[in-house]
Image (cartoon, helix red, strand yellow):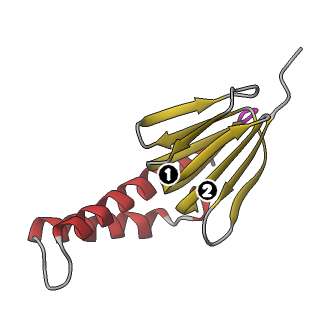
């Protein structure tokens, strides 16, 4: 007997990014990546920044996720992300360009109203998006 698929929703402040069943989810929690399978015990976790992977059969979907919360309860997983993007909607060339600009700005150091902290966050976001977009491109 196989377990009933995990009902999964990924929600950002802008929209619902994913609302379907999944066989497994790997999510970037604040303390490291965690895996969730159908029948997982109830839990809540603070989300970190990273690539979230949802697997259904032989298909995987990827999302760049930044902050928020994850809840598992009654075979349902909900991610309320501060910010998130579906990897298949990210343009890899644009993301790589943003990463190059962010890394160049970091090398140049803080300028005008951009602190080192802001530049570091921009570079981290670009790296996560690049990884997600690269993983999604490999699926095609």
Mark 2 sits on what residue? Answer: 80
Mark sitting earlier along the chain (2/1): 2
Q: In the visual, does 101 lie left or right of 88?
A: left
Mark 2–mark 1 distance (CA, rounded to whole Å):
18 Å
- Residue 125 x, y percent position in the rendering: 38, 60
Quarter residue 40 falls in:
top right
Which quadrant is the N terminus positioned in?
top right
Q: Are marks 2 and 1 in contact (CB under 8 Å)?
A: no
Residue at the far bottom: name it.
Answer: 112
Residue 120, magenta (yes or no): no
Which disc number belongs to residue 132? 1
Residue 59, magenta (yes or no): yes
- Residue 42 x, y percent position in the rendering: 68, 32
Name which residue lies at 26% across and 70% down.
118
The number of discs equals 2
The residue tagged with tag 1: helix, strand or loop?
Answer: helix
The residue tagged with tag 2: helix, strand or loop?
Answer: strand
Question: Is residue 77 shown above or below 107?
Answer: above
Name which residue lies at 20% across and 78% down.
114
Residue at the far right: name it.
Answer: 1
Quarter residue 54 falls in:
top right
Question: Is residue 38 shown above or below 11?
Answer: above
Q: Residues within 10 Å of mark 1 (few under 14, many from 20)?
A: many
Query: Which span of residues is magenta-colored?
Result: 56-60
Question: Is residue 66 shown above or below 1?
Answer: below
Q: In the visual, does 37 lie left or right of 115?
A: right
Residue at the far left: name it.
Answer: 108
Q: Residues within 10 Å of mark 2 (few under 14, many from 20)?
A: many
Q: Nearer the viewer, mark 2 or mark 1?
A: 2
- Residue 49 x, y percent position in the rendering: 43, 51
Q: Magenta residues: mostly which secondary structure?
A: strand
- Residue 96 x, y percent position in the rendering: 37, 63
């Amino acid at each position: 007997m196989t377990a009933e698929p995990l009902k999964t929703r990924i929600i950002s402040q802008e929209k619902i990014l994913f609302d379907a069943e999944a066989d497994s989810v790997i999510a970037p929690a604040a303390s490291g990546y965690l895996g969730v399978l159908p029948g997982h015990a109830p839990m809540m976790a603070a989300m970190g920044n990273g690539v979230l992977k949802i697997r259904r059969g032989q298909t995987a979907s990827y999302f760049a996720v930044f902050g928020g919360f994850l809840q598992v309860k009654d075979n349902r997983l909900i991610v309320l992300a501060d910010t998130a993007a579906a990897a298949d909607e990210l343009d890899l060339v644009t993301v790589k360009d943003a990463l190059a600009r962010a890394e160049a700005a970091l090398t140049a150091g803080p300028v005008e109203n951009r602190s080192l902290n802001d530049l570091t966050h921009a570079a981290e976001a670009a790296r996560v998006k690049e990884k997600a977009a690269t993983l999604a491109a490999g699926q095609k």
